Amino acid sequence: MPQIEVLTVSQLNLFAKRRLETDAVLSDVFAAGEISNFKAYPQSGHWYFALKDRDASIPAVMFRGSNQRLLFLPENGMRVVVRGHVSIYERDGKFQLYAQDMQPSGIGALYLALAQLKEKLEAEGLFDPSRKKPIPQMPRCVGVVTSGSGAAVQDVLQILARRFPPARVILCPVQVQGDGSAAQIARAIERLNRDGEAEVLIVGRGGGSMEDLWAFNEEPVIRAVASSKIPVISAVGHETDHTLCDDAADLRAPTPSAAAELAVPDQQELFAFLRNVRERSKQAVLAVVRTKRFQLDYLLQARVLRGPDALLTVPRQRIDDAQRRAHDAMNNRLQAERRRYYTIVSAIDAMSPLRVLTRGYAIVTRGGHIAASAAELKAGDEVEIQLRDGSRTATIAE
């Protein structure tokens, strides 16, 4: 009878694990399905989910080292193609798929990542039109963030120099595609903001595929553009290309060359405008001079200017009238006061004691006091008798 080998649970799980991991198919497998029960653990960074189809499902895990390379965030219900290997989690005897890569099924990963990032940044208000700053009309300094080589930067520099030579140009050459390009672009925008010399920024590059332009869809670039205190003109690719940098910028230009034309005015157009203003100003001044000259000629023909004495005729008449009215008023007042004076004098005279004395009466006083009664006088008193035309002193005899 053959000897029977008894395995422990741990040995059994380990045996199955090794068999699965050494299988030519299961050690590098592609599996398509729909994501469900997706959970992302912030502390570890690992993702746990189930991959299912209509008839079955398999638990799956994607560790942080693998999921950091993805350009999108998986969601429940999303159909994906997962590449990885199948194994058993020894502790639980759990058969599961260990994902190493993942791609959306039916939609490109770049488009999905773009849609998710746009939705996130829109929710934060980074694309809000109210954030847009006006582009200065005549900047004294233009900052350019693009590749230091290639036709795009040469076109931008030539157009800026031709259209508006007074403007200085600060070129910040950066890598515009590939790993690290987004960080370089963001740092260049931040450095120009710190320097504070540029009054407008051109950020962009020439045309290319979606992958070539991807740096201008990355979050560091979008946030740097949106937070820039200096107005930003986005100039990425061709007219048909569109990136999130265009949405965050204060103005979108269809090409880098167009951005240069939008950033500065045309010096020749300015000169033509100034010539036009000068000519219109000249004609306006001449029209005013002609009008004033006509008015002066008209005034010179006036009788007043030909005979200035005419200006004094009316004032003289007014003065004469005023003097006459003042003289008449003074005479009338004088006559009234004279009549009033005579009336008062007559009333006083009628009441005067002297008027009584003229009729033969006399006033007798003793010691300066009028003697109104004979009983007030006695023999021997000296009295003064006031008559009409003088006074006499007398002694009372009886």
Image (cartoon, rainbow, N blue to C red):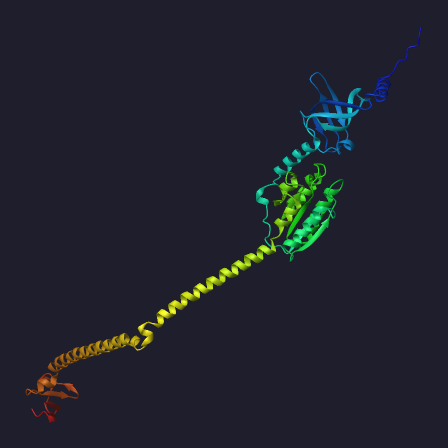
Q: Is residue 189 left or right of residue 313?
A: right
Question: Looking at the image, is 329 positioned above or below residue 78?
Answer: below
Residue extending farthest left: 360
Question: Looking at the image, is 30 positioned above or below residue 274?
Answer: above
Which residue is depicted at the point 65% across and 33% down? 115
Q: Is residue 373 visible?
A: yes
Question: Looking at the image, is 167 positioned above or below residue 364?
Answer: above
Location of residue 25 by image quarter: top right
Location of residue 52 by image quarter: top right
Instruction: Please state the horizontal and vertical placement of residue 155, each as a whole percent of the image.
Output: 68, 49
27 or 374: nearer the viewer: 27
Question: Looking at the image, is 333 positioned above or below residue 281?
Answer: below
Give the quadrant of the C terminus: bottom left
Q: Is residue 278 left or right of residue 17?
A: left
Instruction: Please state the horizontal and vertical placement of residue 221, each as a whole percent of the image.
Output: 69, 43
Q: Is residue 274 left or right of residue 371?
A: right
Location of residue 103 by image quarter: top right
Give the quadrant of the N terminus: top right
Q: Is residue 193 visible?
A: no
45 or 303: nearer the viewer: 303
362 or 240: nearer the viewer: 240
Instruction: Please state the horizontal and vertical placement of residue 151, each as a whole percent of the image.
Output: 71, 46
Q: Is residue 49 left or right of residue 272?
A: right
Instruction: Please state the horizontal and vertical placement of residue 340, each as a whole percent of the image.
Output: 16, 78
Which residue is depicted at the point 66% across and 52% down? 160
